[in-house]
Image: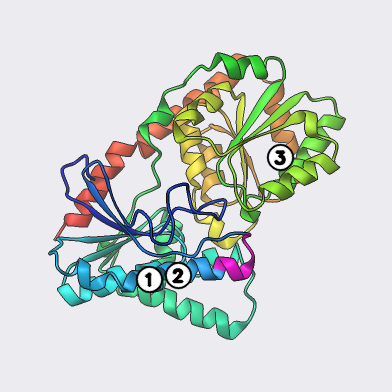
Amino acid sequence: MSEAGIEIDVLCGEPNYPKGEWYKGYGAFRRRRERHGKINIYRCFEIPRKNNTNLRIFANYMSFPFSSLFHIPERMRKKYDRILIYQLSPVYMAWAGILIGKLTKTPVITYIMDLWPDNLYSVIPVQNPLIRAGLLSTSTWCYKNSDKLICLTETAARIVKKRTGKASSDICIIPQCCEKLYETPVYDPKLHQRFPERFNLVYTGNISPAQDYPLMLRAAKLLHSKGYQINWIIVGDGMSRKDFQNDVKKAGLEPYFFFEGMQPMESIPAYTELADGLIACLCKSELLECTIPAKVMSYLASGKPLILAMNGEAQSLVNNNHCGFAGNSGDLKALVQNIAKLYRMKDVQRQALGENSRKLHFNSFERNDNLRRMIRFVFKQ
């Protein structure tokens, strides 16, 4: 939006994800104001996740919503045309934006990246019915008190429309879009020297319980026992990375798994260029069925075949457009069969699947087209 000439102020927290520690140079009282290009950044106090226990996650989730309230008086000194809430977790991060909007009569638009409270249940299994009812009520309040809502998929839009009673004209569907750099393959000779012979399966992004890494590991064990020579290249970090690495060690598969850690965004195209296939799994969840993960979008842009184990919209997207093979969440047999199928394909066949991925990306998910749609919706009277 800044590239389109819109003046932007950002109110956000302290960078501490996914390791749960403040990034170098940041802290409780450091770098509270920054400038990124033409964008003004104002940072609120936030408790880092640290060891990612339920208590630390709760403290991290709630510290930003409360600390952001103290920034309301300062932000009200400036007249804004629109307030756009980029809503991750928790939904309560929207409090400050909603209140500023009400106090200054400024339209508020919430871009729902994590649908609440559903998203919470994929991280913390809340079972108490009273707590669940309270979470649903307070989450719905945030959505109802936004003037407009942007959803990632049609399924998510139907859910929020039912919960909020908003008119269809006040809800827009705009998928997550990856940055343009993912569209351009980058050949890295050093990476090719490291992985010269075996079939390369690449995973990028967050490593958390929702990504169902045990399924990937069980598939690797079965395929290895059948003689398939596969490099499992894991690019990313998250709360489950250590458990993943420990389980790989216990399974005796260390020679086949390569944990590259968190990499700069600019380095990812070199890994996807290396890949014979790009893999992603999700645990079974009604919420996750109505989302298309960001990594799937970047996978499509890279022009490589996808191997997915996930239900819902992402599965339909890949299978209907012949971008690879997608089975159900938790379905070990289907995942093994799909990887084996891609493994046995000729290069020209895999290339055709990759070309379908790229075609789908440019037809439906290209960044600039969707940004223009979002700007029109945000500023429409």
Q: Is residue 21 left or right of residue 84?
A: right
Q: Determine the secondary structure under disc 2.
A: helix
Q: Position of residue 368 (x, y in %)?
A: 28, 37
- The residue shown at (35%, 53%) is 31
In the rendered image, the vertical position of residue 94 relative to residue 180, given as above or below: below
Q: Is residue 232 magenta?
A: no
Element on which disc 1 rests: helix
In the rendered view, tell whether residue 41 sits above or below residue 47.
Answer: above
- Residue at 50 percent across and 56 percent down: it is 290
Q: Residues within 10 Å of mark 2 (few under 14, many from 20)?
A: some
Provide the residue designation for mark 1: 67
Q: Is residue 331 visible?
A: no
Q: Residue drawn 48% across and 35% down? A: 264
What number is the disc on residue 63? 2
Dot 3 lies on which element?
helix
Residue 215 vs residue 123: left or right?
A: right
Q: Please indicate whether residue 36 sits to the left or right of residue 263 in the image.
A: left
| Amino acid type, mark 1 | Ser
Task: Pick whichever of labels 2 and 3 is earlier in the sequence.
Answer: 2
- Check contact, mark 1 vs mark 2: CB within 8 A: yes
Q: CA distance from mark 3 to mark 1?
A: 44 Å
Give the CA distance from mark 1 to mark 2: 6 Å
For label 3, the residue is 335
Q: Mark 2 belongs to which amino acid?
A: Ser
Give the quarter of the figure containing the C terminus: bottom left
Which span is picked out in magenta? 51-57
Crowding around mark 3 (Cα neighbors within 10 Å: few <14, some 14 to 19, many 20+) is many
Q: Which picture quadrant has residue 209?
A: bottom right
Q: Are marks 2 and 3 in contact (CB under 8 Å)?
A: no
